[in-house]
Image: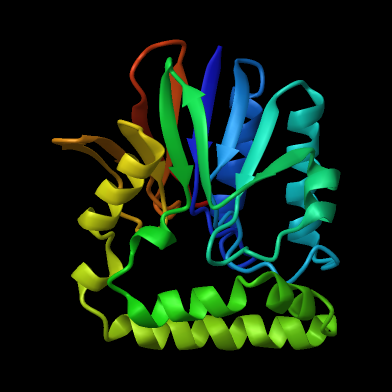
Amino acid sequence: MTTLLISDLHLSPERPAVTRAFFAFLENHADDIKALYILGDLFEAWVGDDDPAPLARQVIAALKKLSDSGVRLFFTHGNRDFLIGKQFARESGATLLPDHHLDELGGQRVLLLHGDTLCTGDADYQKFRRKYRHPLVKFLLRHLPLKKRQKMAVEWRQKSMRANANKSDNIMDVSEETVAQLMAQYQVKLMIHGHTHRPYHHHMAFGERLVLGDWHQRGWYIRIEGDHPPELISFPIEES
């Protein structure tokens, strides 16, 4: 059987072509996969499991249909949807994974993560991450009025875009030293992540690192079938 991994779809009402591509992706692969791993940033923004937005409900319904068919569904938080919680997991049938998840895929141990924890050169982002990913802060955020959270999400996105425009490419990419440290810590030769929007299969002296791409003009996924090596695959997203 086959395992698929995706990340960085950034689903939003403003990008209906990507949403259609995602639903088609689920339908096309539902019959021949045993597991789907979503490695963060499925949504452009997630303000809480109580958000009644139509897109959120449609995605949850599609994931529930997939999990009800027998496909095991796993979700890792990204930097855009870190407020996804137990209600989402229950309604979709997904299992929430920790930031760094060790698994066995394709006959080998693999470290799965969103990828933002690897970008240690971006000190401002890491400071923001430590603050807002603290369990107490997340609890407080989830209990703010919905409209307040929606406003904050817009403000955070605008602030992030302004800040990233002034950052060098090297700062926004992973730290190779951090990659090496984590792979040694978890004793793996394979790491899979997203976040950087730089799809590539890196071959390093201490192992391999597969980076998923973001869904924009193309969709990206990793396919692991049996004990075969993982494949990084892309396909065009059609505007209609």
Q: Is residue 111 above or below residue 8?
A: above
What is the x, y in percent for residue 139? Answer: 77, 74
The answer to whether residue 84 is left or right of residue 68 is: left
Quarter of the image holding residue 233? top left
Q: Is residue 82 above or below residue 148?
A: above
Q: Quadrant of the N terminus?
A: top right
What is the x, y in percent for residue 181? Answer: 29, 50
Q: Determine the residue positioned at 47% across, 52% down.
A: 114
Q: Is residue 57 visible?
A: yes
The answer to whether residue 66 is left or right of residue 33 is: right
The answer to whether residue 181 is left or right of residue 95 is: left
Q: Is residue 234 visible?
A: no
Quarter of the image holding residue 168? bottom left
What is the x, y in percent for residue 150? Answer: 72, 81
The answer to whether residue 52 is left or right of residue 152 is: right
What is the x, y in percent for residue 115? Answer: 41, 55
Q: Is residue 117 above or below residue 108?
A: below
Quarter of the image holding residue 222? top left
Check the image and name the residue furthest to the front: 185
Q: Determine the residue positioned at 30% across, 31% down.
A: 189
